[in-house]
Amino acid sequence: MDPTRLKAKENSNPIPPYKFTPSFSFTSHNQLRHHFSLSSPLSMSQRNEERMKNRSSRKISATWIPIFCIPAFLLGMLITSSRMWVAPESNGQLISTRRQEQELQIVSEDCATKKKPGQEKDVMDEIYKTHESIQLARSLDKQMASIQMELAAARSSQEMGTSSSAGGNSQLSKDSPTRKKAFIVIGINTAFSSRKRRDSVRETWMPQGEKLLQLEREKGIVIRFMIGHSATSNSILDRAIDSEDAQHNDFLRLEHVEGYHELSAKTKIFFTTAVAKWDADFYVKVDDDVHVNLGMLATTLARHRSKPRVYIGCMKSGPVLAQKNVKYHEPEYWKFGEEGNKYFRHATGQIYALSRDLATYISINQPILHKYANEDVSLGSWFIGLEVDHIDDRNMCCGTPPDCEWKAQAGNVCIASFDWSCSGICKSVEKIKHVHEKCGEGDAAVWSSLF
């Protein structure tokens, strides 16, 4: 700074004397004089100049602070953002790299496993051979089961023949021990007092005389009225059945004492006797107050011929009736759990069909099969625990006209028709002809059916 300007400034603004508290003491006048001599105007001007320089230097450094801070801040943001984006880029690169590696691995595996046309043909041949082996194994298994059933049936037939021979006159002892082949064996359950019902069946859906034998020879369908004998040997009831059988030759006599409460036992004996006499694909039980279309029955059963252990009918699960003095009372109701429970699924007793292996099972085990009060319940109980195919076919339980009539007009001819309220056709002797006219398939249907 200019000394003249500084001097003028000093004159205009005199510098006040220094006020300070010394931290030391002067020992002599000379020392004090020397100290104040340092505070001369010249020295003071120099000192002020130094102060101004220091202040100016400080102002310059403070001015540069924002200039340095802004670039530093931007540089820090750049570094931070670069760190934030490095990881995703690296992850994306890593994922893409792994994906490329996987694609290369798949391609390499495809290339490694790619077969020549000859090798592909060998693989297909192996698959075909394996499939053939599985089919052959299944066929052999079915044949073995069939052979076992036939052996058991033959053993049962031999035992029945021996006991019948010991007992005297018998239908089984008269017939040949060799079982006849058949497609369906139909047993019509009847009683001593049901002569008019039997005649009404013969006049409607059941062939008679030579046509009955022709149906057995050409179609393999055997139809018999099944009945036992009375409690009294050679009674008038038995002689009446013998006379009727001599006229129509359409009875299957059972070693069974007739009685309404013995239907479960009669059912077991029917299947045992039928299996012993005929080697059939199916065995059918039907009541004598039910209308049947034989062509539809045969066609339906033919669709299930290849299936093992088939149980076909109108499946139901009615209540277990514990109250006494009611129809279908179940004395052993306590076996079915709490009061109000229902039976297991079983076919209604008016008509049902069993495949050969199930009928043979009954034949073999009939001495130990439990009999419940109701025959249809007993039959269903015998199959509990077995691998049985329960087929619910509602065409086997159509109602009487107009129900079956409407279905026939629509092209859905029923297999069997009856009235649920009567457990058969109500007043069947008078009404079954009307049912046959309205719901029958026609006499030629069974002969033209392919099965």
Image (cartoon, grey):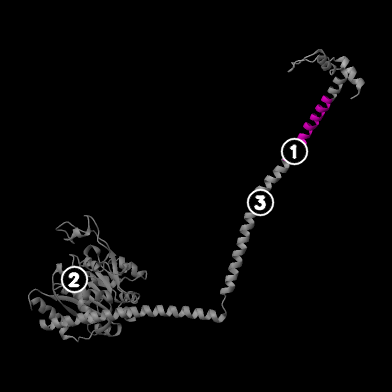
Residue 414 magenta-highlighted: no
Mark 2 or mark 1, which is nearer the start of the sequence?
A: 1
Marks 3 and 1, how far apart in space? Answer: 24 Å
Q: Which element is circle 1 on?
A: helix
Q: Looking at the image, can residue 397 be seen?
A: no
> In the shown orientation, is residue 410 left or right of residue 260?
right
- Which label belongs to residue 368? 2
* Distance of label 1 from label 2 (alpha carbons): 104 Å
Q: Amino acid at mark 2?
A: Ile
Over which residues does the magenta segment extend?
50-72
Question: What's the distance in space between the residues labelled 3 and 2, CA to CA?
Answer: 83 Å
Q: Relative to residue 62, is residue 403 drawn left or right?
A: left
Relative to 397, residue 148 above or below? below
Which residue, given by chain and number where applicable, does mark 1 sit on? 70
Q: Residues within 10 Å of mark 2 (few under 14, many from 20)?
A: few
Q: Quadrant of residue 268?
A: bottom left
Residue 347: horizontal and vertical position, in percent?
A: 27, 67
The image position of residue 324, as x and y in percent, is: 15, 57
Please state, as top left, top right, bottom left or bottom right, where the C terminus lies in the image: bottom left
Q: Nearer the viewer, residue 21 or 116?
A: 21
Q: Residue at the location (70% across, 42% down)?
A: 76
Of the two numbered discs 3 and 2 on the same chain, state the one appearing first in sequence. Answer: 3
Q: Which quadrant of the figure has residue 337?
A: bottom left
Residue 91 sits in quarter: bottom right
**Residue 294 numbered tag:** none
Numbered badge on residue 86: 3
Tell me the residue at 35%/77% (across/down). Answer: 306
Image position, residue 171 (x, y; %)? 15, 82
